[in-house]
Image (spheres, helix red, strand yellow):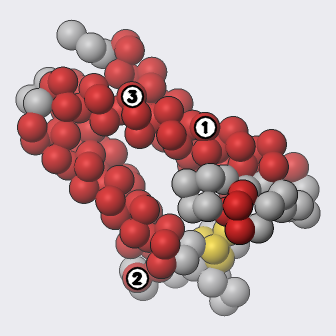
Amino acid sequence: MTLLQKIAFGYFIVVGFAASLNYLPIPGIIDENGNAFGIFALDLFDDLLHLVSALWALAASLISHRASKIFLTWFGLAYLADGLLGLATGSGFLDFGIFVYGFYEYPSFLIKLAANTPHLALGGFAVLSAKLFDR
């Protein structure tokens, strides 16, 4: 297994965990208002999006180095763009939030940043990994 395949497998674990947040009885993850980490709500559509992404990562990691590079590139670009749009507008496109809710005002820029950091970090690292570790 190449490094890119291992990274893609890591994405399977991380994004799979994100898909399961609403269903794990871990104190402090989902608050009394249904918000993950007290910042944002994850609905069934978000959970399915994360599950499909995790399964794509798993398949890519098991298939080949090339499949892992394709996954990391396209997943990375999509999640990075979603995080940037969320940072700019308060809503992303992967969950159709920008189309359903339009611009969303968070109570502060720091909360908006915290809400979008997962997609910015996951997307940015995926794109960088696809470029830096393609050997």
Residue 50 drawn at (x, y percent): 41, 60
Residue 91 drawn at (x, y percent): 73, 56
Which comes sooner in the sequence, label 1 or label 2? 2
Q: Which residue is mark 2?
A: 23
Residue type (three-letter) at the residue carrying disc 2: Tyr
- Point out which mark residue 81 bears: 1
Viewer-side residue, 70 vs 124: 70
Residue 44 located left or right of residue 56:
right
Q: Secondary structure at mark 2?
A: helix
Residue 131 drawn at (x, y percent): 38, 15
> How many dots with numbers?
3
Q: How many other residues sit within 10 Å of disc 1, few (<14), some (14-19) or many (≥20)? A: some
Residue type (three-letter) at the residue carrying disc 3: Thr
Residue 61 drawn at (x, y percent): 17, 39
Q: CA distance from mark 3 to mark 2?
A: 29 Å
Q: Are marks 3 and 1 in contact (CB under 8 Å)?
A: no
Viewer-side residue, 99 vs 48: 99
Q: Quadrant of residue 26?
A: bottom left
Which comes sooner in the sequence, label 3 or label 1? 3
114 vs 45: above or below:
above
Q: Which residue is mark 3?
A: 73
66 vs 50: above or below:
above
Is there any visible trace of residue 52 in the rendered image? yes
